[in-house]
Image (cartoon, helix red, strand yellow):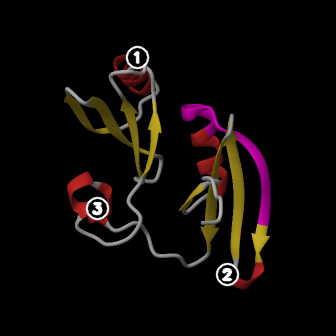
Amino acid sequence: MAEFAFHHGGVSVPSLKDAIAWYGEVLGFAFEREFFIEREGAHAAFIRRGAMRFELFEVTGAAPLPEGRRSVSGDLKVHGNKHLGFRIADLDAFLAEMREKGVEIVLEVRKPFGSGCFIHDCFGNLIEFVEEPNDG
C-alpha cells in the first residue's frame, strides 16, 4: 500500500477573516497563507500550529451550518465528516482556558479510557479535545 500521512482538516465558514482571528486568538493557530479557488469561488486560507495544518473556506452563497450539526448527538445522525479531534495533556486546564476566553463548551466527557470535551468555534462548528490517561 502507498504511504500517506495526515496533512490537514478543513471547514467552511461565513467569514474567513473572523475564523482566522478566532482560531489564532483562541487555539493558537498562526496564519500561513491565503488563496482563491476560482472554480468554486472560494476564498481559502491555511492556518498552522506546529505540524498541524487547518484549511478554512469562505464561499459566497454557501448554506449556513444546519442547527442539528451544532450538537454532538445531532451531528452523529448526519452522514459525512463530523469534527476534528485534538489531543491535550490536561483537560481541566484546557477547559479553564476556554472558559476564560468565553468559548462555548458543548460537552464534557470523563471515562476511565479517556476524557475530553467538545467546543464550538465562532460559527458553531464542533471541535473535540481528548485527554488520554497516558498523556502525562
Span of residues in magenta: 24-35
Q: Classify 10 Å Cα crowding around label 1: few (below 14), some (14-19), many (20 and above).
A: few
**Which badge, 3 or 2, comes first in the chain's sequence?**
2
Q: Which residue is labeled 1 in the image? A: 93
Residue type indicated by callout 3: Asp
Q: Is residue 30 magenta?
A: yes
In-front residue for pair 37/62? 37
**Which badge, 1 or 2, comes first in the chain's sequence?**
2
Q: Which residue is labeled 3 in the image? A: 75
Tag count: 3
Q: Callout 2: helix, strand or loop?
A: helix
Percent across and percent down for residue 9 are: 57, 56
Q: Classify 10 Å Cα crowding around label 3: few (below 14), some (14-19), many (20 and above).
A: some
Q: Which residue is labeled 2 in the image? A: 40
Query: Compared with residue 79, is residue 104 higher up or lower down, i.e. above or below?
Result: above
Q: Callout 3: helix, strand or loop?
A: helix
Instruction: Tell whether 112 sits left or right of 33.
Output: left
